[in-house]
Amino acid sequence: MSKVIDTLTSTSKPLQLGGLIDRMRAFTTHKEFERFWKFLVVGTIGAVIDFGTFRGLDALNWFEATRVALPLGLSLSEAGITGGIAFILAIISNFIWNRYWTYPDSRSKPLISQFATFAAVNVAGLLIRVPILELLSTPLGNLEHVILPQLGEQAMISMGRSSAWAIAVVIVLFWNFFVNRYWTYSDVK
């Protein structure tokens, strides 16, 4: 019986909690955790460039009447075109920041080949992103109009596109981090 009491009152629970805290501390001080946070900061800068360009081009209506025909009977509307342009500008910014700040020890690879790899990963991200923009912009705008019926048509369209953009950014963020970390910046230890 005293063995059971000793077990119940022993310091095993605080040690377990302490062990968890030690593991969390080790994780948060791990180099990959630091890189992930830097990647998020860079991504935030890219998102500001991306969203600002996306909304700015959308507000200018330069591509309002434009439809770009794609293979297989598909086409891009204004949302897909402006989203693509904004995404490309963000890629350039993100590459520069990631190469020189997030992964400064990755510069053993030639600049052009590393940018080509980074761009390929991001083009794949664009192929994930554009269908999300095309498929979700109108339904999300309609949903937001149901929730907020006082919205005018232009506000509904704008909010739908912005919501679709936000969903696409989150999905593509995880794709970009993991694929870039283990392919583009594979020389980093």
Image (cartoon, helix red, strand yellow):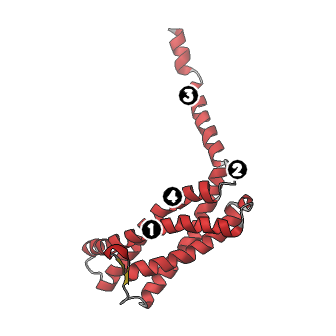
Lower sequence index among marks 4 and 2: 4
- For the point 56% across and 74% down, the residue is 90
The residue wearing badge 1 is: 127
| SS type, badge 2 | loop
Query: For the residue marked with disc 4, what is the amino acid?
Result: Phe
Q: Of the residues under marks 3 and 2, which one precedes in the sequence?
A: 3
Q: Nearer the viewer, mark 2 or mark 1?
A: 1
- Calculate the distance from the C-alpha at mark 3 to the C-alpha at mark 2: 36 Å
What label does residue 178 carry, if any?
none
Proximity of marks 3 and 2: CB atoms separated by less than 8 Å: no
Tell which of 10 and 87 is nearer to you: 87
Amino acid at the residue labelled 3:
Lys
**Amino acid carrying mark 2 in the image:** Lys
* Label 1 – label 3 distance at C-alpha: 49 Å
Residue 189, which numbered label?
A: 2
Q: Which residue is mark 4?
A: 174
Q: Earlier in the sequence, mark 1 or mark 3?
A: 3
Disc 1/disc 4 C-alpha distance (Å): 14 Å
Residue at image mark 3: 13
Relative depth, front residue between 145 and 10 = 145
Q: Are marks 4 and 2 in contact (CB under 8 Å)?
A: no
Q: Is residue 17 above or below residue 62?
A: above
Q: How many discs mark residues in the rendered view?
A: 4
How far across and down, in percent of the image, does residue 31 sit? 68, 50
Between discs 4 and 3, the one toward the N terminus: 3
Q: Looking at numbered disc 1 in the image, what kind of residue is underneath it?
A: Leu
